[in-house]
Amino acid sequence: MTISSDRFYAVTLQSIYFVDGSETGKPKVKLVATKGDGQIGSMLKNGAMLAIGKRLHMYFPEGCGVLAPAVEFERKLEKVNTVYWGGHTSRIVALCRTRKQAHKIHSQSDLKPCDKRWLKSTRCILQSIKKDHPVFEVVDWKDFALIPQD
């Protein structure tokens, strides 16, 4: 089953996560499979937004919206004080649309961060996420970007 750009699977070096940003408010990142010690069904915590870069990283956008409503929140992870950063995953291998594809990738023994074998799928998902998505921020900062800039 194929899913929308608000929902996708992230395969990391250790695990598979189902990412859902379709509901307003906050993203849901659920562990669905692991080679490590994680508890299946557990959620990434401590954030109202999800940065998608070398890792999935929950965070709270920084800003003075309560004290000065005209000031916008800072969405870029690299500009947000690390005190507002929350839970994160290990390095991402690939992003994909289906659970079946995620399990196929995860079953490989020679996984690498941002694995070139699934670069097309990863790039497609990143490009489908709009710049003003309410809960996702695709990291383009060179030190944290999932796909290195040439």
Image (spheres, helix red, strand yellow):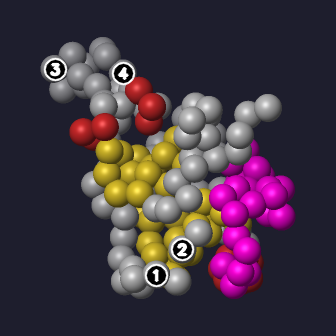
Amino acid type of the residue tagged 2 in the rendering: Gln
The residues tagged by marks 1 and 2 sit, at their Cα atoms, a distance apart of 6 Å
* Discs 2, 4 touching: Cβ within 8 Å: no
Judged by depth in the image, the label closer to the viewer, 2 or 3, is 2
Q: Residue furthest front?
A: 110
Q: Secondary structure at mark 2?
A: loop
Residue 121 visible in the current orientation: no
Amino acid type of the residue tagged 1 in the rendering: Gly
Does residue 17 lie above or below 109 as drawn? above
* Discs 1, 2 touching: Cβ within 8 Å: yes
Instruction: Specify which label sits upstream in the sequence, 3 or 4.
Output: 3
Kindly identify which residue carries mark 4: 72
Judged by depth in the image, the label closer to the viewer, 1 or 3, is 1
Q: Nearer the viewer, residue 71 or 58?
A: 58
The residues tagged by marks 2 and 3 sit, at their Cα atoms, a distance apart of 41 Å
The residues tagged by marks 3 and 4 sit, at their Cα atoms, a distance apart of 11 Å
Q: Is residue 116 left or right of residue 113?
A: right
Q: Residues within 10 Å of mark 3 (few under 14, many from 20)?
A: few
